[in-house]
């Protein structure tokens, strides 16, 4: 099922690449886009985790610096029967976390410096269990590939927008001319965002439930989510929109209309589900 989701995601985002290429340059544009999409799919599959870690300047968190974190992760990995992931830290005061890696054997859990300073042991364990559940469910490949390809689509759409504004679009009716190019430059990032939303929202609920089962303490994760959301609104994480779906809570502070396109389900609903859980 995980492999099917990966293929479907890569196919959908590749289709957007081809659409951009076709509108911008006809058959020749589609051919260039196909080559570029193939290259990006290769890069996304093999190197997307490294790209994301580098984007947030994350570095390994040594066990001598944070022995309690390593002990928490090691204990839960033994329970979940998965290999110990690498643990990284990224130097931002806003509290948040994400997981990456194409399979459990190559997984990384990244924590912000702010979350290490803010959370108590029970809350932090809930956060780590959430990210570890993403690893167990093999969500990390899907999420990180989506981030890499969505970023490429955003870049291409941005270039197409400028191309159209300065008269580079095709003028024939079949291609839609400059108006079609500009419309594509707006719609392509929206389509990529919708794909990320469909991918991320259901997986967050599943990761919350998995974390509750792993820790036997859903209330601690609920408390952590409330605290993370409150602090993130006051001190937003410096994050790009195409990687927002990776984090345990949305790093973006947008409200109103932007909330409709959030990659995360409403925090109130996630907390309510956790607090309603009765674990044996």
Image (tube, helix red, strand yellow):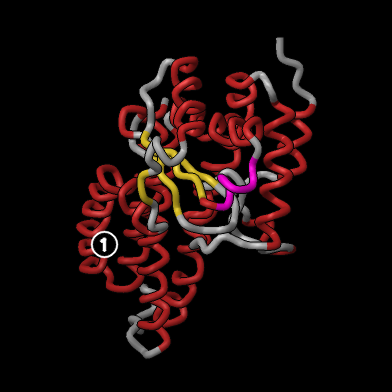
Q: Is residue 226 visible?
A: yes
Give the image location of residue 169, x and y in percent.
35, 82
Q: Residue at x 33, y 73 (%)?
A: 24
Give the overall secondary structure of the magenta segment: helix
The residue most toward the bottom is: 166
Q: Residue at x 65, y 30 (%)?
A: 122
Judge from the rendering whether residue 129 lies leftward or rightward of residue 160; answer left or right.
right
Look at mark 1 in the image and give the residue it sits on: 33
Q: Is residue 142 visible?
A: no
Q: Residue at x 36, y 28 (%)?
A: 104
Q: Residue at x 49, y 45 (%)?
A: 111
Judge from the rendering whether residue 233 lies leftward or rightward of residue 129; answer left or right.
right
Give the image location of residue 46, x and y in percent.
25, 43
Closer to the camera in the image, 46 or 130: 130
Examine the image and state in which quarter residue 253 appears.
bottom right
Range of magenta residues: 114-119
Judge from the rendering whether residue 186 lies leftward or rightward of residue 124; answer left or right.
left
């Amino acid at each position: 099922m995980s492999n099917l989701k990966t293929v479907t995601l890569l196919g959908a985002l590749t289709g957007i690449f081809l659409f951009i290429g076709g509108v911008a340059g006809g058959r020749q544009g589609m051919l260039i886009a196909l080559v570029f999409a193939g290259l990006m799919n290769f890069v996304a599959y093999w190197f997307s985790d490294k790209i994301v870690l580098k984007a947030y300047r994350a570095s390994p968190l040594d066990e001598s610096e944070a022995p309690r974190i390593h002990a928490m992760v090691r204990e839960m990995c033994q329970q979940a029967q998965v290999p110990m992931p690498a643990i990284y830290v990224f130097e931002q005061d806003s509290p948040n976390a994400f997981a990456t890696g194409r399979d459990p054997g190559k997984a990384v859990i990244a924590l912000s410096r702010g979350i290490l300073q803010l959370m108590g042991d029970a809350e932090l364990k809930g956060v780590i269990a959430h990210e570890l559940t993403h690893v167990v469910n093999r969500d990390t490949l899907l999420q990180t590939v989506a981030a890499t390809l969505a970023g490429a689509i955003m870049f291409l759409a941005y270039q197409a927008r400028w191309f159209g504004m300065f008269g580079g679009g095709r003028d024939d009716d079949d291609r839609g001319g400059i108006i079609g190019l500009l419309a594509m430059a707006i719609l392509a990032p929206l389509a990529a965002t919708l794909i990320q939303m469909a991918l991320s929202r259901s997986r967050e609920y599943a990761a919350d439930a998995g974390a509750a089962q792993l820790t036997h303490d859903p209330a601690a994760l609920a408390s952590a989510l409330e605290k993370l959301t409150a602090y993130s609104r006051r001190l937003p994480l410096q994050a790009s929109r195409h990687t927002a779906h990776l984090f345990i809570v949305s790093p973006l502070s947008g409200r109103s209309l932007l909330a409709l396109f959030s990659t995360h389900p409403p925090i109130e609903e996630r907390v309510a589900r956790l607090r309603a859980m009765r674990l044996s």
